[in-house]
């Protein structure tokens, strides 16, 4: 399940994609908490940052950026940038991460790891 979790070009099974989703979501929570704290400490953002699962605006922006970076790295690693359906799936994942929920956008990213060439 957690084999090749950092290899973005690896074609995964459904259980491998679930492990990828869990690993990178936990990594996202840590990254978002770290960035939210230090962006607030250095005065770059104002107000209360809040928690990751509260759906704060800064966490949503960090999460949508994370989904965008991961999906683009998966598409370029698998050489799927010419496949229009894969690109549309990545855009849908970014949209869902920003407008609905970051965790739903990560589901789309996990699905992108199951696609082959």
Image (spheres, rainbow, N blue to C red):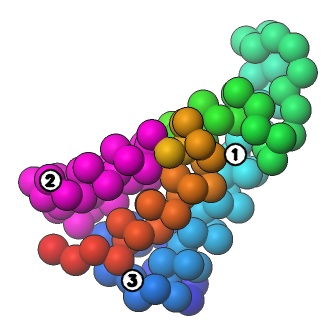
N-terminal of the pair, mark 3 or mark 1, is 3
Secondary-structure class at tag 2? helix
Secondary-structure class at tag 3? loop
Whole-percent x, y for residue 9 in the image: 31, 70
Between circles 3 and 2, the one closer to the viewer is 2
Any part of residue 35 in sight: no
Front residue of 117/34: it is 117
* Mark seen at residue 12: 3
Between circles 2 and 1, the one closer to the viewer is 2
Front residue of 99/111: it is 99
Tell me the residue that label 1 is attached to.
31
The residue located at (61%, 48%) in the rendering is 102
N-terminal of the pair, mark 2 or mark 1, is 1
Q: CA distance from mark 3 to mark 2?
A: 20 Å
Tell me the residue that label 2 is attached to.
84
Q: Is residue 72 left or right of residue 4?
A: left
Q: Residues within 10 Å of mark 2 (few under 14, many from 20)?
A: few
Q: Which residues are magenta?
A: 68-95
Quadrant for the N terminus, please: bottom right
Q: Residues within 10 Å of mark 3 (few under 14, many from 20)?
A: many
Q: Height in image: 86 above or below 54?
A: below
Whole-percent x, y for residue 105 in the image: 52, 52
Any part of residue 14 in sight: yes
Secondary-structure class at tag 1? helix
Quadrant for the C terminus, please: bottom left
Between circles 3 and 1, the one closer to the viewer is 3
Q: Is residue 30 left or right of residue 21?
A: right
């Amino acid at each position: 399940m957690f084999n090749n979790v950092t290899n973005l070009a690896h074609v995964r099974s459904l259980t491998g994609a679930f492990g990828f989703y869990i690993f990178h979501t936990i990594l996202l929570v840590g990254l978002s908490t770290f960035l939210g704290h230090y962006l607030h400490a250095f005065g770059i953002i104002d107000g209360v940052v809040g928690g990751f699962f509260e759906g704060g605006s800064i966490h949503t922006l960090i999460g949508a950026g994370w989904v965008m970076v991961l999906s683009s790295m998966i598409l370029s690693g698998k050489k799927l940038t010419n496949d229009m359906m894969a690109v549309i799936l990545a855009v849908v994942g970014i949209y869902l991460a920003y407008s609905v929920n970051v965790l739903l956008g990560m589901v789309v990213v996990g699905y992108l790891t199951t696609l082959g060439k």
